[in-house]
Amino acid sequence: MLGQEYSVTNHTLGQYHLEKLYSGMEQMGISCSPSEIEKLLIFYEMLIEKNKVMNLTAITEFDDVLEKHFLDSLSLVRNINLRQSLKVLDLGTGAGFPGIPLKIVFPELELVLVDSLNKRIQFLKEVIEKLGLSGITAVHGRAEELAIKAEYREKFDLCVSRAVANLSSLSEYCIPFVKIGGYFISYKSGEIEEEVKAAKKAIAVLGGKGVEVEKFTLAGTDISRSFVKIEKKKSTPNFYPRKAGTPSRDPIH
Ligand code: SAH
């Protein structure tokens, strides 16, 4: 078993049972080093500690965080080769999902974490520093404001997002950040046909093409999930994204 290759030496971390993490990673074909496992565990501890004073996650049990946050975040590996130096933006990262687990396990990725809530961004800056991560920044701002800035607009190979908005609004947040030839991949739950249908127009208008839906079961669970993968084919018209609040109040339809 993959797990036998690891020995987490730090005594404070020895209390955790890591079987679920190892077997979930093994199912997804992910290998990672003991120091990466240790970083995931330190991140878990920081998350739980900060969650006492700030709303970061409703899920706090170790096994649940492993499955529903860590393994779920990492399942992106099913969809795209993450062992390369892609420029990735995580829109509405919240407590760092999927961005932080992705950066820890796939260190070649160059990550920008974005959230409109400054307290969460401050927490993520502490995480980045404590874990000694490089090639990752946490930026405070709304998608609608950052995506019109030259330094962010159409600069990313990949924009990912989990649990932020419906696919139509989310496309308006995310597609403007993506380079032509790059991808926007949204983490979604299992049943998304209607949502995809409702977002077709928005995706086309924003320059996306070819919506691919991949359904799967989250490793080690019976939770059904899906990825919606959209390739960017054309530049996004300057009109988009519209001003803050409009994409969610009045999605392109
Ligand atoms: N992706 C995380 C957090 C989801 S909660 C996870 O899966 O656990 C949604 C997050 O999106 C919140 O932290 C909220 O502040 C952020 N958010 C919502 N609308 C946004 C916008 N327009 N621009 C940037 N961040 C946004």
Image (tube, rainbow, N blue to C red):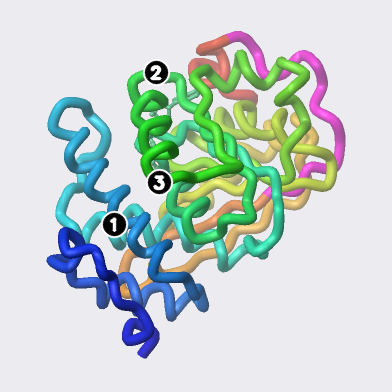
Can I make out residue 236 in this image?
yes
The amino acid beneath tag 1 is: Leu
**Which residue, given by chain and number where applicable, does mark 3 sit on?**
131
Q: Secondary structure at mark 2?
A: helix
- Residue 32, how many percent across, how many down? 47, 70
Give the mark nearest the N terminus, 3 or 1. Answer: 1
Judging from the image, what secondary structure is the residue with disc 3 in? helix
| Relative to 217, 64 lies left or right | left
Marker disc for residue 118:
2
Please tell me which residue is depicted at 67% across the width and 40% down the height of the picture. Answer: 200
* Badge 2 amino acid: Asn
- Residue assigned mark 1: 41
| Quarter placement of the C terminus | top right
**Residue closest to the eye, 43 or 148:** 43
* Up/down of 63 relative to 18, above or below: above
The answer to whether any part of residue 205 appears in the image is: no
Q: Name the residue type under label 3.
A: Leu
Mark 3 or 1: in front is 3
Closer to the chain start, of discs 1 and 2, is 1
Q: Is mark 1 within 8 Å of ligand 1?
A: no
In magenta, the rendered stretch is 230-243
Evaluate if marks 1 and 2 touch, with contact meaning CB atoms under 8 Å apart.
no
Magenta segment includes 238? yes
